[in-house]
Image (tube, helix red, strand yellow):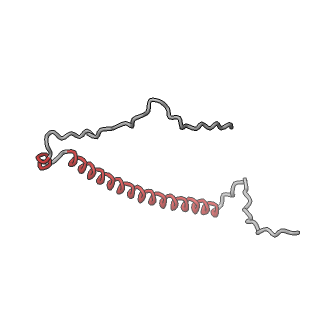
Amino acid sequence: MNSKHAPRRIFPKVSTMPRPQTEAAQYLDMYKLTVEKTRLQKELEYIDERRQRLCDRLAELEQATEGLNAQATSMRQPTQASKAARPQSAHFAPTANVYLPERAASAPDDYNTLMLDY
């Protein structure tokens, strides 16, 4: 039974011999450098755009933080109207009493003990 495999891509042979110093070799090197230069310029543009977006987001976060800080400060410092409405004897400590359940002095007799062996 023959199994059919998809044709594999043929990779070019790698030559360890340097290319001959011809005009075509020089143009090929110029082309490779131009392609790399274009790629690097696009990458720099992307990095600049990304940096600008990050700076904008940082500015938004800074404004939001300042706004929340201002709100917290205004809540921390009571206004004159609320000072007059609140009695001077008001305490901020909890005043609820905690009552613990009463416990019997001895253990009840209705306990069932079960032993498990592992």
Q: Residue furthest top?
A: 105
Q: Residue at x 30, y 54 (%)?
A: 64
Left/right placement of residue 44 relative to residue 6 reads: left
Q: Residue at x 29, y 53 (%)?
A: 63
Q: Quadrant of residue 90?
A: top left
Quarter of the figure that contains the C terminus: top right
Q: Residue at x 57, y 61 (%)?
A: 30
Residue situated in front as seen by the camera: 17 or 78? 78
Left/right placement of residue 111 relative to residue 64 reads: right
Residue situated in front as seen by the camera: 19 or 80? 80
Left/right placement of residue 35 relative to residue 16 reads: left
Residue situated in front as seen by the camera: 35 or 17? 35
Can you give x and y, in whole percent of width and height, for residue 34 in the image?
54, 61
Q: Quadrant of residue 96?
A: top left
Q: Residue furthest right?
A: 1
Quarter of the figure that contains the N terminus: bottom right
Q: Residue furthest front?
A: 109
Q: How many marks?
A: 0
Can you give x and y, in whole percent of width and height, for residue 111 in the image?
55, 37
Can you give x and y, in whole percent of width and height, for residue 28 in the image?
61, 62
Q: Is 60 located above or below residue 118 in the figure? A: below
Q: Residue at x 23, y 49 (%)?
A: 70
